[in-house]
Amino acid sequence: MAKAPSRPKILIVGAGPCGLTAALELARLGYHPRIIDKAPGPTPLSKAVGINPRSLEILDASGVTERLLAQGIRMQGVQARYEGRLLAEIQVRRLPHRFNFMLALPQSETETVMEDVLVSLGVRPEWNVELTEIRLAGGKVEADLKGAHGGTFDYVFGADGAHSRVREVLNLGFSGYTHKRIWSIADAVIPDWPFPEATAMANLHRNGDMGFIIPIGPKRFRAVSNTPEPLAHLPGVESAQVSQSDTFHIPVRQADSYQTGGVFLGGDAAHVHSPIGARGMNLGIEDAFVFVRRLSEGTLDGYTSERHPVGRRWILLSERLLGVVQSSNPLVIGVRNLAMRTVNNLPGLQQPMMERVAGLKN
Ligand SMILES: Cc1cc2nc3c(=O)[nH]c(=O)nc-3n(C[C@H](O)[C@H](O)[C@H](O)COP(=O)(O)OP(=O)(O)OC[C@H]3O[C@@H](n4cnc5c(N)ncnc54)[C@H](O)[C@@H]3O)c2cc1C
């Protein structure tokens, strides 16, 4: 009897949303990857809170989406305000798609669901296991690990985040810059929030300050600002109980190549950019999906040429959006606000941007 062809040995470094997606897709197709993470378990932080329609589509096949939908909030609208006054409501519900909403759910809950489903498919993440070294040798990849035995693999998928060790040991450049402006983020209960609950809101100011808010649970919200005070730039917040808060600078960087030998990068290891448009985690989920599709088709050579331009285009667009929303130039503000009011009155004009944010058009 002919011997069944052996499956490639695959190591996924990082069990964040990108690495977990790669593991889920591989497991669904009958591969048995190892997936390691130096952390003790899924992130306890809420981090990315917007799951877009393309990610929901990708995660549907493994059964993850059904469980996310049961836990998340279906955000069908995003309001843009200027000094508290409504400029436009982007009606995500008008997207011609079965998932015509952004699903709001803290990343900690998303990762926990993904891990549960992965375990049910027979792959258990190895927590507290760190990748320390990688060597390319004879068409294979040797990996040294701390906390478990390493070995030789056919492919390594580096989904180990913005400070990727995989990218570092292979000397893959990560070109870009970091914005000087201090941003802030908070999760808070706002008992008397006066606006529709399943709607996100951006409130822009004439001096370029901005506040953004996303619902993440009953009376619970994620607030982000391009100032050190996450809640100060939102209308209607009389009182709030803050549970987590932090400040950060926005890095804008992209790996020069997403692959070398049998090693591939995805997610924040490959690209980082501003949270405007909520595409960060979602782009990584797409990278992982494409990596697995190409691996199963035997077309991994084309991985960088497919995914690098997508990351590039999004970085350029999110930088342009960032410049426009935080402008203090009266001329730019006038044109921007007029454009937003026009888009509000002609909802058909909202479609191209919504499709980009939704991940349905790259
Ligand atoms: C406070 C905060 C708020 C954010 N808010 C948003 C938001 O609102 N919207 C948005 O789109 N994005 C947001 N992000 C970014 C978003 O969280 C990331 O884009 C997303 O997590 C990237 O997923 P990933 O799987 O590529 O990487 P990560 O989630 O960073 O996962 C990488 C994993 O690799 C592991 N790892 C690292 N090095 C090693 C090693 N050597 N060996 C083994 N394991 C290793 C880490 O422990 C980690 O679990 C936020 C991030 C933070 C920190």
Image: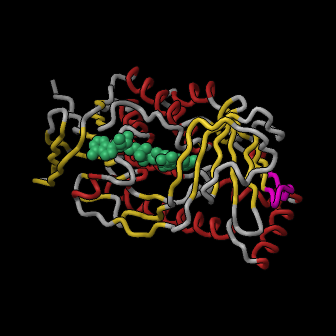
Q: Is residue 225 left or right of residue 55?
A: right
Looking at the image, the residue that sits furthest to the top is 120
- Look at the image and give the residue range highlighted in magenta: 81-89
* Residue at (59% x, 63% y) in the render: 318
Image quarter of residue 195:
top right
Q: Is residue 320 above or below residue 93?
A: below
Evaluate whether residue 188 shows in this view.
yes
Evaluate whether residue 13 shows in this view.
no
Quarter in which the C terminus is drawn: bottom right
Image quarter of residue 355:
bottom right
Q: Is residue 232 left or right of residue 300?
A: right
Q: How many marks?
A: 0
- Which sits in the foreground, 331 or 133? 331
| Residue 255 percent across, percent down from the top left | 37, 63
Looking at the image, the residue that sits furthest to the right is 345
* Residue at (16% x, 28% y) in the render: 2
Magenta: main secondary structure equals: strand
Residue 349 magenta-drawn? no
Image quarter of residue 1:
top left
* Residue at (79% x, 48% y) in the render: 91
Q: Is residue 331 left or right of residue 285?
A: right
* Residue at (74% x, 56% y) in the render: 351
| Residue 78 percent across, percent down from the top left | 75, 49
Residue 82 magenta-drawn? yes
| Residue 158 percent across, percent down from the top left | 32, 48
Give the color scheme: rainbow, by chain, secondary structure or one colour. secondary structure
| Residue 69 percent across, percent down from the top left | 62, 29
- Which sits in the foreground, 130 or 237? 237
Q: Is residue 286 above or below residue 205?
A: above
Q: Is residue 10 left or right of residue 159?
A: left
